[in-house]
Image (cartoon, helix red, strand yellow):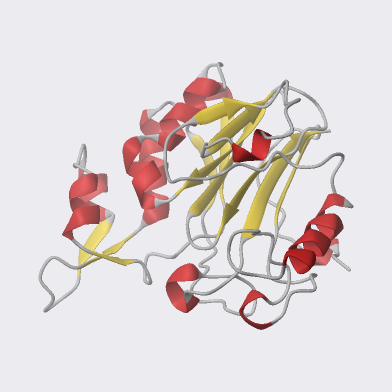
Amino acid sequence: MLQTTDLIIPEWPAPTSVRAFFTTRAGGVSSGAYTSLNLGAHVGDEPQNVAENRRRLRELLPTEPVWLNQVHGVNVVMADAVLSPDWGAREADGVVTTRSEMPCAVMVADCLPVLFCTVDGSRVAAAHAGWRGLASGVLERTVEAMATNPARIIAWLGPTIGRDAFEVGADVFDAFPPESAEDVSAFRPITGRRDKYLADICALARQRLYRAGVHAIYGGQFCTVNDPKRFFSYRRDGKTGRMAGLIWIA
């Protein structure tokens, strides 16, 4: 069964009314490349295994999570009045709620999951930030959708591909036109390889959040690629499962 010891609990000064965690590989029933808590229904795992994994996750939550159809975009939706059975088919990479006991969720396997809450716990959000969404402004759109003073928002950066593992080309470098020296420093040229860089996606996220007015930023210390026992990684394995970052108001 899924235990709380299988989860990563954010270390951040969120109010006691806010609950959040990030799943790892542990605690599920999937096998092979999906061992064991794969939550993704779109990656080739047996549907009955995914259903059981989600059932186990559901036991730790007040209600069924708000699952999104993530497309590496910038669409952010409000989940305060989710009544339609086709909600999960909506294309979005960010979700916000002010409603209690409604978990917001994003799934990842190297992309950056970012969880948000206000200092008073009145609203929470989750965003899926791959490099495309990050460059296009998904974090800024999520902050805007929270409809509050950004200085009242706390953000946590979950497990993602680390700065020593994220090799990118000129297309990614060019997607982030530098606004400061910090932007440039997030890309380290690889010696002897033209137009190849190691990118620090957490540094890029922090800079974009900071410019959006969010200054209380935590997390960012877990690399999915370099910890195969704990994390799924698409960059490392190709065929693999999905983890989830979840947050709700208790």
Q: Is residue 250 above or below residue 181?
A: above
At a point 36% along the width and 51% down the height, the residue shown is 131
Residue 118 visible in rendering: no
Does residue 32 appear to the left or right of 19 in the view shown? left
Does residue 135 appear to the left or right of 228 in the view shown? left
User: Looking at the image, which is closer to me, 207 or 99?
Assistant: 99
At a point 61% along the width and 79% down the height, the residue shown is 33
Does residue 55 appear to the left or right of 214 in the view shown? right
Q: In which quadrant will I find the N terminus?
A: bottom right
User: Looking at the image, which is closer to me, 204 or 240?
Assistant: 240
Number of numbered labels in the structure image? 0
Quarter of the view holding residue 35? bottom right
Q: Is residue 239 above or below residue 246?
A: below
Q: Residue 179: x percent and y percent? A: 21, 37
At a point 38% along the width and 43% down the height, the residue shown is 134
Quarter of the view holding residue 50? bottom right
Q: Residue 28: x percent and y percent? A: 79, 70
Does residue 137 appear to the left or right of 218 in the view shown? left
User: Looking at the image, which is closer to me, 70 or 189?
Assistant: 70
Quarter of the view holding residue 201? bottom left
Q: In which quadrant will I find the C terminus?
A: top right
At a point 18% along the width and 49% down the height, the residue shown is 174
Residue 94 visible in rendering: yes
Q: Residue 217: x percent and y percent? A: 52, 41
Q: Residue 180: x percent and y percent? A: 21, 39
User: Looking at the image, which is closer to me, 85 or 131?
Assistant: 85
